Structures are given as C-alpha cells and as structure tokens.
Amino acid sequence: MNAQEFDNSLESLNGDRPPESQPADKPEEACGVFGIYAPEAEVAKLTYFGLYALQHRGQESAGIATFDGDKIYLHKDMGLVSQVFKESILHEMPGTLAVGHTRYSTTGSSRRANAQPVVVDTRLGKLALAHNGNLVNTLELRQLLEQRGCNLIATTDSEMIAVAIAQEVDSGKEWLEAAISAFQLCSGAYSLAIGTPAGLIGARDPNGVRPLVIGTITEDTVRYVLASETCALDIIGAEYLRDVEPGELVWITEEGLASFHWVPQPQRKLCVFEMIYFARPDSIMHDETLYTYRVRLGQQLAKESLVEADLVMGVPDSGVPAAIGFSQISGIAYGEGLIKNRYVGRTFIQPTQHMRESGIRMKLNPLKDVLAGKRVVIVDDSIVRGTTSRKIVKALRDAGAKEVHMRISSPPVTHPCFYGIDTDNQDQLIASTKSVEEIAAQIGVDSLAYLSWNGMLEATGEDTNSFCSACFTGDYPIPIPENIKRSKLVLEKV
C-alpha cells in the first residue's frame, strides 16, 4: 500500500460524514444493539421497541434482521427507528430470532451501505451482525481479509468482523468455533449481537468496554434478550438476568443459554462515560440506575467545588441528576432555568443570521423570571469544545443572571476515544490545550470547576481499576496502533 492509498484508507476508516453531521459539542453516542430469541413471538416488533428504547445511542440509521429457519428478512435504512420502520414492514418479517441496530458512525461513513445489521453469506447460511464499539486494528484486519480473497463492500469494522466469522465458517468450522476464531483477530471494543439460522450469539471484547446485558421473558417458555442497556429490556417486559461478561460468548438456542469464556484472563474496562453520560439514566449498571450514580457525582462535585449562589440548575437533560446531587450537598435551591425543546431534530434548513446570533434557543430557552438577578450554578456532564457552553452562559446572562458558575460532573476531556465514541481530534478538545482558568475565560463564566478523576471513579462504588477513563487520562487499556493514533492525537511539542 503506497502513501496515498494509506491516507485514503485511513480517511474512510475514521469516517467521512457530511458537514451537516459533523460532531456536536458533546462526545457523540455509541451504537445500540439488540437481539432476541423468542419462538412464536413477534420478534421483529419486539426488536423495534427495543431499538426505540436505544434510540439515544445512535440516530443515523436503524435496521432489523429476522431469521425464520434458513430464511432471513432484512430491513434497514437511514433515519430514526420510527422513520425506518412501519407496522406493514414489521408484519412481513417473521422469525424465531432477530437482531437489531441503531447506528452512530465512528468507523465508516454515514451512508446506507454502512447501516446495520451487516448480513453475509456463509457455508452454514446467512449471518446478521450488530456491533457497538470500534476496532483499532482495522487497517491490518482489512489487509488480512483482502489477502484471503474476501470482498468487502462497506467501510465499517463491523463488516470486517462479520466477514471474518464467515471466512472461518467457510473453512469448515461451526458457528461458535468460527466466531471465537474471528474475535481473536480483532483488537478493540466490540459488543455484538449475531443472528444465525441455528441460534443467537452475544459477545463482548476481553475488556468489556461497551455494555451488553441479558434479559429473559418468561411465559410458557423462557425467551432470551440481548441489549446494550437494560432500558431496552424494560420496554418489552423482559427481566434483567445479568451482563455478558468481558471475553464471554453466549449461545442462545431452543435448548437455552450456553456460556463460553474464550479469553483466559479478561480485564474489565467498562467505559466510564457510559455511566456519566451515554447510557439512559433509567438503565441499570452495578445493581442501581445510572440516575443514582449521576446524583452521587453531583454530590461529590459539591464537596470538591462549593460556591456561594442562589440557584443550582442542570443543562437539560444529562446535567440534571448531577445538579440535583449538587443541590443536596450544597444546600443551594435546585430549579429549572433552561427549557429544552425535545422535538428539535436534525434540520437541513439553515437558520437566519439573526437566529444564529441568538445562539442555542432552537434547543434551549432560558426562563428570564427565574434567572433575573440570581447567582447561578449550572451543572453539565462534560465540556468538549466549549462552543455550546459559551452559548449557554451567554443566554443565562442575557436572561439577567447576576453570576454564572459552571460545574462539570466529570474531569476535563483531554484525549480522543478510539473505542466507539466519536470525539474530536485532540487539538479540538478545549481541555487539551487550555487550563481551567483559560476555559472559564473563553466560555464566559465567573468560575469553573471539574469533578476530580478520583471522585468520579470512587463514586461508582466499584473497583476503580475496572473502568476505561482514557478520554480523561490518555491511558488507553487496549494498545492503539501508531497510524491510528496519529489520526487524532496532537504531536507533542518540543
């Protein structure tokens, strides 16, 4: 591969979204996966509702594949779950098991060819794969598969995993042996729901960076569900059973659920940002809702960075639990100062110049009578580039706030993610190039404070070594190849 070919490959593997879908001023969502084995149930409809609950994890495309014996029915397209599917479509997708996906692109461009589930042919029938995460050895894996004569159509690492499994099947292996052999070629983060004519596979990488849970629906027989979060179980009336463990493969068939641990010593490194921001607050991790954890983050934040003020408020919606916790410890009254328009989606109509100058009011509108003359503490979960924070602060001041103090319920984001969260390059992360005081001046607040790294991890109540916090520290638990690092990391200045 010459230099130009390398550059082109790197560009496609790191995504080439159109300008209208460039990253917002937040880490963008991971993807959502869902799988169900439920003979005699409407698996397509149950998958639809599961994806509906996981819509926050990806809004670019959605897809469902169902298996009815050796037959597979697939429908996927760009758009939200409710836009992609209609009752008539789901009615024409019979089966005993299904796999579904909502996508936000982190590897591969935003186009229909990259929508999931990925479906490939094998010696044993078709395979449908839904993937949440990001591989870090995509260039090497692509080269290996092409050398073996594989034809890759899309530009996603998800397709590479599916093709790698198919190739192992075609070499004579059965489903489970083939899947495990393929996983051993992959480096990075992957939580997978894989449909086959013989059964449903769920698997996580050896570090368990992205979540994957198992649920059950008990009626006449036990039916099993796989999902990125427990909120997808709740919506269809399934009961949470347990997590798929790091380095575990579960095999679900008419005989029940079988478990295989294919990594000798897995090292759990769940993305801590799943707990801070990505997952829904009603989802359960470590035997409690994430709402409860986020309230504790706010409580710890108040202990670390108290300030005199009249009102504590959260940035809707993700900053609200931490703001409540901050209020509980500080004794400062909690209230709403910003109202969110929950019906604003992506629009391709450009706002007028006056609307652009007015900042963020299409999505957030301040309550002037609540804010006028008040010293306000506004709590958010993170700051990435600072552009939205600056607009929020200006809106609060324009509404009459006397002082604006910002508190962030996570440490400064200083490094990009390579494991399935779409963050900016390092030089676009405001905390990587500016001090806290400089950030405060740029966004226009009277004071700014972040939660400490120790405070964030200790609030989990779990082993603090069992989380990936690389976006705050630069300590990546899965080694990143130099060619991939160079695509996002700033070269150190001499």
Image (cartoon, grey):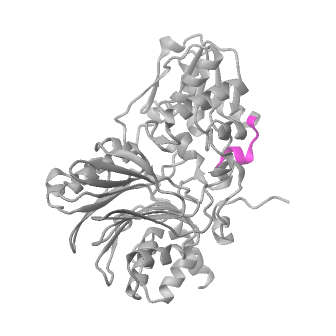
Residue 8 makes an appearance in the image: no
Image point 50% across, 89% down: which residue?
Answer: 147
Image point 86% across, 60% down: which residue?
Answer: 494
Q: Quadrant of the N terminus?
A: bottom right
Q: Is residue 362 left or right of residue 432?
A: left
Assess whether residue 435 is covered by the magenta stretch. yes
Q: Give x and y (percent) for residue 235.
A: 31, 41
Q: Give x and y (percent) for residue 344.
A: 37, 37
From this view, report whether residue 388 is shown above or below residue 268. above
Assess whether residue 239 is covered by the magenta stretch. no
Q: Which residues are magenta?
A: 428-436
Image point 52% across, 31% down: which residue?
Answer: 292
Q: Main secondary structure of the magenta part?
A: helix
Which quarter of the picture shows residue 123? bottom left
From this view, report whether residue 35 is shown above or below residue 187. above
From this view, report whether residue 38 is shown above or below residue 305. below
